[in-house]
Image: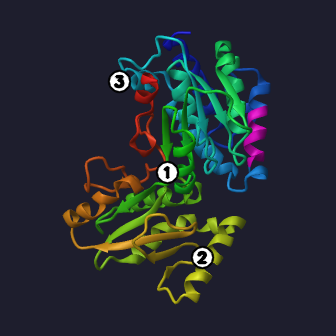
Amino acid sequence: MQLNQRITAFSKLGGFLKNFEFKNDFTAKNLTLDQKWFTGFENIIRNAHVYNAWFTEDMVRLAIKGWAENLTEESLNQWMNGYADGEKKDAPKKVAVVMAGNLPLVGFHDFLSILITGHKVIAKLSSKDKFLLPYLAEVLIHIEPDFKDKITFTEEKLPAFDAVIATGSNNSARYFEYYFKNKPHIIRKNRNGVAVLTGNETAAQLDGLATDIFSFFGMGCRSVSKIYFPEDYDFDTFFNSMYAYKEVINHDKYVNNYDYNKAVYLMGLEPLLDNNFMILKEDPSFSSPIAVIFYEKYKDAETLKAQLKPSKEQIQCVVSSGFTKNEVAFGHAQQPLLSDYADGVDTIAFLSKI
C-alpha cells in the first residue's frame, strides 16, 4: 500500500467523522458508507459516558470535530510533504502504543502517525477509552482493507514489538523508561497549557480562553491550567468571560472535584478567588486539580519569559497574543494541527528512523 492510498483512506475516514461533529438528526447525514457504520458509531458516541463519565456526548463530539477537520486530503498531504523520508521504504516495524484515556481519542495521533508511515500499530488501550478508536479502526479497514493486518488492539500484555510510544503520568513515565529502555521509544510525561494575559484582551479572546480552560473539563495536556496575570488585573473581566461555562458545575464528577478542592483549600486557610463553578488559586505549580486554575502575577513580559524558560518541559503550549513566537491563539489550545506534536517530539521523524 502506497502513501497516497493511506492518505486517501484517512481522508475518507475524516469525511465519515464530519457526520458526527454535532448532534444532527441521522436522516440529515451524508451517507458515504453503509448506514450500519453510522448507526454503530452514533451509539458509541451517545453511550461513551456510561463507561467513562468524563466522556460526555458534547466532549466526544468535540474530539471528533478536531479530527474531522484534520483528516482532509489537503492537510494530510501538506503534513507528509514535510518529510522526505516519512514513508517507510523497507519492512514495516511493529510499533506499540500505550495509550492514555484522559480525553476521547487521545491516542489517535499516534495511531495515525504509525499507519501513515507504513508501520504496523499495536495499541494497548486504556480502560477509560476502549470503544471509540477500535470502531474507527473497523471503519478504516472497511474503507481500505489493506489496513487489516496492520492494526492490533490489546488490553493485556503487549505482544512482540520493535518500538514503542507510551503516554502517562510522571510516575508511570519512570516505569516506562525502565521497561522500554532497550527499544526505540517516545515516553511522554505530564504537561500543561499555560496562558499569559496582558489585560488588553478582547472579549472574543477571553471567550476563547474559557474554551481552552473548560474543554474536556480541563483534563488535556493542552488544557490551560495556569494563567499569568499582569499586576492590578481586573479579575471581574476574567470571570465574566468564564460565565458561559457555568453549567459545567452540573456534571457530577466535576462538582465533586470542585467541592472537594474548595473544602481542602478553605480548611488550609488558602486565599481563593471563586465564582461558584471554578476556583482561582495563586500557586507556582503548573498542574492544577480539576475545577481549579493556578495563577501568578508578573511585572513585565521579558521577566516572565525568563521565568518560564527553565520550565519548558512542563509546558505543552502557551496561549497568548504577542507574548512569544510559538504561542497558540486564544481558543485554539484544543485545536492542534497534525504537526503539533505532544511534548514537542516529532513522531513522524522518530518513526522514519526505526
Please report the residue visible at 33 percent of the width from the left and 65 percent of the height from the top. Answer: 197
The picture quadrant where one finds residue 339 is: top left
Q: Earlier in the sequence, mark 2 or mark 3?
A: 3
Q: Badge 2: few (under 14), some or many (20 or more) residues near its Cα, within 10 Å? A: some
The disc label shown at residue 82, or none: 3
- Residue type at mark 1 is Lys
Please report the residue visible at 46 percent of the width from the left and 24 percent of the height from the top. Answer: 354
**Residue 65 image point, x, y percent:** 57, 39
Horizontal arrangement in the rendering, residue 64 relative to residue 206 (left or right): right
Magenta span contains residue 47 = yes
Quadrant of the rendering where the N terminus is positioned:
top right
- Residue type at mark 2 is Asn
Name above or below for residue 170 compared with residue 264. above
**Residue 313 image point, x, y percent:** 38, 53
Between circles 3 and 1, the one closer to the viewer is 1
The residue nearer to you, when weighing 140 against 185, is 185
Q: Earlier in the sequence, mark 1 or mark 2?
A: 1
Horizontal arrangement in the rendering, residue 129 relative to residue 179 (left or right): right
**Range of residues picked out in magenta:** 40-48
Distance between mark 2 and mark 3 Cα atoms? 45 Å
- Residue type at mark 3 is Gly
Distance between mark 3 and mark 1 Cα atoms? 26 Å
Please report the residue visible at 61 percent of the width from the left and 51 percent of the height from the top. Answer: 102
**Residue for badge 2:** 261
Please report the residue visible at 65 percent of the width from the left and 12 percent of the height from the top. Answer: 146
**Residue for badge 1:** 189
Label 1: element kind: loop
The disc label shown at residue 350, or none: none
